[in-house]
Image (cartoon, rainbow, N blue to C red):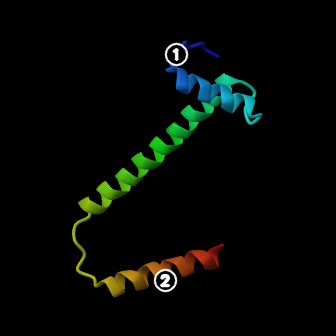
Amino acid sequence: MATMNISLPDPMKAWVEEQAKSGRYANTSDVVRDLIRREQIKADKIANMQRLIDEGRASGISDRTPRQIFEDVKAEFERRKGAA
């Protein structure tokens, strides 16, 4: 594992140390790793949502009514539920 030195303002340093002392983490490095891991997951989710939005926008405007779309989604849900 690589080592990295970071500088934090005193209030942030105190917060990280308190998190480590709480017993939830073994040490301050675990706190920082967890924060980074959570940010990576969040960034991946945002990127996936953006990809889905881009795909939706690129697909154009549907000529189906909202009711037809709802019925199609409902049928797909029921199909998947029955397959599980």
The mark found on residue 75 in the picture is 2
SS type, badge 2? helix
Q: How many marks?
A: 2
Query: Which callout, 1 or 2, points at the residue further toward the start of the chain?
Result: 1
- Give amino acid for label 2: Ala
- Assign a secondary structure to mark 1: loop
Quarter of the image with the N terminus in it? top right
Q: Quadrant of the C terminus?
A: bottom right
- Residue 22 to residue 45: above or below: above
* Left or right position of 23 against 2: right
Locate residue 34: give its quadrant.
top right
Residue drawn at x 35%, y 87% is 67
- In the rendered image, residue 61, in percent from the top left (x then y), is placed at 22, 71
Q: Quadrant of residue 64?
A: bottom left
The picture places residue 60, in percent across and down from the top left corner, at 22, 66
Residue at horizontal 72%, vertical 24%? 27
- Please give the label number shown on residue 66: none
Residue denoted by label 1: 6
Q: Are circles 1 and 2 on residues that touch, CB within 8 Å?
A: no
Residue 1 or residue 31, whichever sits in front:
31
Q: CA distance from mark 1 to mark 2?
A: 53 Å
Q: Nearer the viewer, mark 1 or mark 2?
A: 1
Label 1: few (<14), some (14–19) or many (≥20) C-alpha neighbours in 10 Å: few
Percent x, y of residue 35: 57, 34
The foreground one among 4 and 63 is 4
Left or right of 9 in this view: 65: left
Amino acid of disc 1: Ile
